[in-house]
Amino acid sequence: MQEQLYTKYKALLFKLAYQLTGSVSDAEDAVQDVFIKIADVPPERLAEPKAYLCKMVTNRCKDLLKSARKKREEYFGEWLPEPFPSSKDDAMESVVREDLLTYGMIVLLERLSPSERIVFVLREALGFEYKEIAQLIEKSEPNCRKLFSRASAKMGLSDEEELAQPEAEQQQWVNGFLDALKAGNVNRMLTMLDPDVVLVADGGGKVLAAAQPIVSRDLVAKFLLGPVLQSATFGGEVRMEMRHINGQPSIVIRSETGGIQTVGMLRVEGDIVRELYLIRNPDKLQHIAEGGFSERMRLFEPLD
């Protein structure tokens, strides 16, 4: 039974855990921990396995969020969530990609308290009804509605927020931005950036990155065409490509030896970039280099 539950729910639980923690490794750990623990759970308590497992994962992630808060306060520079590769060829990653919040939304989740974040993810990303959320987190339904409303306000969201472009348009737009980067076409890049565009770079103190957000299209363009793409930064020539990360077309920059150095995620409204996130901390790029889930997540066999 344990193995059947794992096969059926592992993608859903990973999607929940990843969006709650912003960490691929923490999400994998949470899912693994839950399936180890349910070996000791009496079968009658698993009459509604989806709700029970989601509750277990949520509680585990709440603990992880508490311990992560201090680490993030001590983190050098800006902290960004780990990007997650979303290959169309992998069945599990395809399931995770469905209804996944955009990367920009996951960044905004950092503004929320653990309870607000849990309610928002359960409601907005996973489509749970308020009655289900109330039972899952043991709060009243009106309280859950207030938490969701408060979370939306903190994130600055409106009803029209995050309406995604069709995928073909997204790819075309990102390819155009990528071409401008490759060519060093400043004028073209400026037309694609909002006057008040914000760039956030996460190097974790391990590689070159902006320690604080960069604001304005002139400064952002200068940064992109300067240190980020300088050969000296990577110790060799670089090449850029488009790849699907977090279910959206993104920019990947590699060194001449093939190692991934930067993942660039864009938040686009209309035809201009409002926010640009550069993940450069090598610890956060490990899953991109590996191509997705770790082998233990793919091959995990529940204990007998």
Image (tube, rainbow, N blue to C red):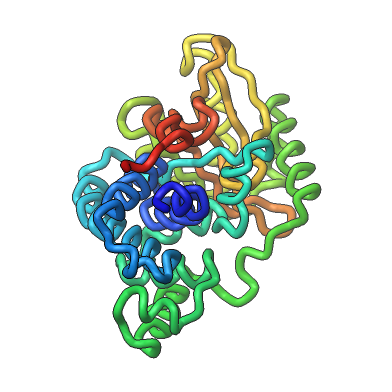
Give the tally of numbered discs: 0
In the image, is 174 to the left or to the right of 14?
Answer: right
Q: Nearer the viewer, residue 6 or 85?
A: 6
**Vertical order, 31 against 105 (above or below):** above
Q: Position of residue 118 (x, y in %)?
A: 38, 67
Res 257 seen here: yes
Q: Residue at x 61, y 69 (%)?
A: 161
Q: Quadrant of residue 78?
A: top left
Q: Position of residue 119 (x, y in %)?
A: 40, 72
In the image, is 113 to the left or to the right of 261?
Answer: left
Q: Nearer the viewer, residue 77 or 163?
A: 163
Which quadrant: the C terminus?
top left
Q: Quadrant of residue 159?
A: bottom right
Q: Residue at x 53, y 64 (%)?
A: 125
Q: Residue at x 57, y 46 (%)?
A: 246
Res 212 seen here: no
Q: Nearer the viewer, residue 264 or 189?
A: 264
In the image, is 204 to the left or to the right of 155?
Answer: left
**Vertical order, 178 against 255 (above or below):** below
Q: Residue at x 69, y 25 (%)?
A: 182
Q: Position of residue 14 (x, y in %)?
A: 45, 50
**Vertical order, 97 against 185 (above or below):** below
